[in-house]
Amino acid sequence: MPNYEKYKCPVCNQQFSRDDDIVTCPECGTPHHRECYGLTGHCVNRGLHSTGYSFLEEHKPIIPEKPQPAITGEYYTPQGDSTKADSNNTENDEEQSPIPSFQPIQFNTPQYKEEGEIDGVSINDIAATVRTNPKRFVDVFKKQSQHRKKLGWNWGAFFFGVYYYLFRKMYKQGFAFFCIQFSVIMLGDTALFKLAPKYMAELQRIVTSFDPTAGTAPDVSSLIGISDAQTAATIVYAMLGALLLFRIIITVFADYFYKGTVFDIIKKVSEQIQDGASFISSPFFTQETGLNQDQMRRMYLGNRGGVSLFAPMLAYFLFYIVTSFI
């Protein structure tokens, strides 16, 4: 029996040991832990069987003695990824598909070049989940772990506020902060109408009577002589100060909350995998894509993590609609 101690199980990503119970695929010879093979129910490389793939002849060691990755930025794509195999596998899917024009979508999140863990979580998993600008967050998470600090500074959160939280898929915190911010603005507006009614009435008159086609700025000199103008100014300054303080709070806690979000995604995905869940549940993503287990895991983490443009745009649209009618 060949010695598989230099390789890893493609399901659990653990290196084989001498005492492991190993089974090999009868078609291509890919080794698996017996328990892992039972969880998947098939060889992880079955998508390559139609190409004549053989583990013993065409495999590349997962732990080479002198790795020479092709580095691009903070990622590298492991040598040995077979474009030809992916092409052949796609042709095979076309023959089996009831709809000839249907093609499974293939994504491959490249592996982060730095190995190691942060608080017991793989840096590769963290980078795959973050997807955009991973180096910055890996460094921040390391510092948070080493110094046990919750506070930091995130310029994205400072400039974009709650919309940055929604962009980074921190939906719980983003929604909570959005409600707080909205409440502060509504409270300020209510105070203005209640404590400075004359000022607000004159301001509304100026706005409604202003003609933008005239090419001149609105005349706001009449606001100066309003009896409750000073009260209105005090309320506005208080509201702006509260919003600035709120923005600073959002900024200093952004990285701390994001670390919790990333780690929670990785934990849930790992638990699902341990329970025997499939990496890909959509009909557009199938295990017949020719990707190995590490690549599919990174792809799945990237889909669960990453960023979202829809959530902040929706929040901004809702905020605009609500404030327009109030």
Image (cartoon, rainbow, N blue to C red):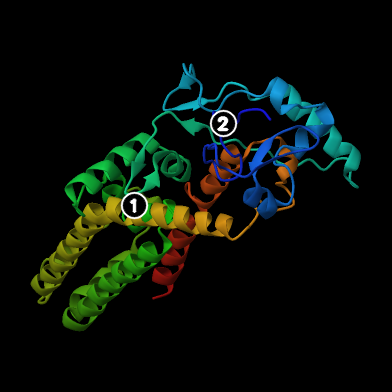
Left/right placement of residue 8 relative to residue 140 reads right
- Residue at figure coordinates x 48%, y 46% from the top left: 306
Visible in this render: residue 216? no
Residue under circle 2?
7
Q: Earlier in the sequence, mark 2 or mark 1?
A: 2
Q: What SS does tag 1 mark? A: helix
Instruction: Give the vertical position of 52 relative to 154 (above or below).
Output: above
Which residue type carries mark 1? Answer: Lys
Q: Position of residue 74 (x, y in %)?
A: 41, 28
Write down the quadrant of residue 105 in the picture.
top right
Which residue type carries mark 2? Answer: Tyr
Left/right placement of residue 42 relative to residue 116 reads right
Q: Quadrant of the C terminus?
A: bottom left
Q: Position of residue 259 (x, y in %)?
A: 34, 52
Q: Which mark is residue 259?
A: 1
Q: Position of residue 295 (x, y in %)?
A: 58, 37
